[in-house]
Amino acid sequence: MRVLILGGTREARALAELLVHDGDEVVTSLAGRVARPRLPVGEVRIGGFGGIDGLADHVRGNAVDAVVDATHPFAEQISANAAAASEQAGVPLLRLERPGWSERDDAAMWHWVDDHDEAARVAAALGKRPFLTVGRQSLHRFVEPLRSHACVVRVVDPPEIALPSAWTLVQSRGPYTLEHEREAMSDTDVLVTKDSGGSHTEAKLDVAGERGIPVVVVRRASGQAGVSVVRDAADARAWVRARSGR
C-alpha cells in the first residue's frame, strides 16, 4: 500500500511507524507551520498542495492507495480539502482524530464556546490574567477583547502579530507535567484552550481544577460528512490493512 498521511500530530507519527513496520510505502505531509516539527519515520514532504485540486493531482500522480487525515483536531480547512480531494481522486479517506476532553468528569463545569471570538468575550468577563493556550494562529481574535488584560500567552513558535504590551509571551512545547503547569499558571485566573484532546497538554486542566479557576474551551467543529473516523493509530492501521487485503 502507498499511504499518504496528512500529519503533524502524535497520532500521525505513531501510525507512520506502524505502517512502515508493515512494509507500506508511507509519505507524511506536514503543512510547514511549525518551525521545528517532530518528524515521523518514512518519507516526509513539507508544504501545502495548492488546495483541493492540487491535493487530488498529487494523490493521482503518485498512485496513492489511501489517505489518512491525521491532522490536528482544529485543522478544519485541511480536513475539508482532504475529503473533497479524496472523493475527486477516487481514493479512500480515513480521519484519525484523538478523543477530546469532553468526557472528563470536570468538563461539565467548563465554559464551552463555539469559536475563538466567543472565547475571548467570555474570558474577558471571567478574569484579569487569562492563560491563553489557543495556538498562535488564533491570537489575533483575542487582542482587542483582552487588550487591557494581563494575558499569559503560550505558543510553540512566535506569533506573527504584535501583542499588547501588558501580555507575557511564553514559548514552549509539551508534553507538560503537573508541576510545570502549576508553575506556569501560578499567577493566572482563567484558562482558555481548545478541545484538542490528548495527554500532552491535559495537565493544565487538572491544575485549573486544583486551583478552582474557570476554564473556557472552544468546541471542535463537526467532522466531514461521510468520512470514517477512528481514535487511535492501531485502529487506523487496521483500516489500512483491510484495504490491502492483509
Image: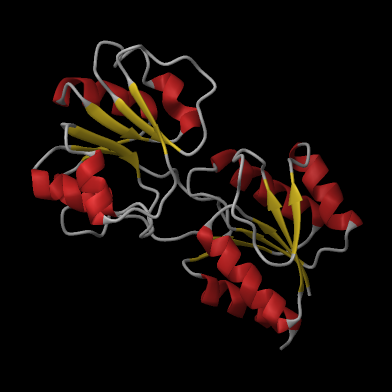
Q: Position of residue 210 (x, y in %)?
A: 10, 50
Q: Is residue 176 in sight in this rendering?
A: yes
Q: Is residue 107 in sight in this rendering?
A: no
**Residue 183: quarter of image:** top left
Q: Is residue 209 left or right of residue 157?
A: left
- What residue is drawn where x is 82% and y is 63%? 64
In this rendering, the answer to whether 228 lies above or below 193 is below
Furthest-bottom residue in this view = 246
Q: Nearer the viewer, residue 241 or 142?
A: 142
**Residue 190: quarter of image:** top left
In this rendering, the answer to whether 95 lies above or below 21 is above
The colour mode here is: secondary structure
How many labels, in total? 0
Q: Is residue 5 left or right of residue 215?
A: right
Furthest-right residue in this view = 61
Q: Position of residue 77 (x, y in %)?
A: 60, 39
In this rendering, the answer to whether 216 lies above or below 71 is above
Q: Position of residue 30 (x, y in %)?
A: 67, 49
- What residue is drawn where x is 43% and y is 25%? 139
In this rendering, the answer to whether 222 lies above or below 152 is below
- What residue is drawn where x is 17% and y is 45%? 208
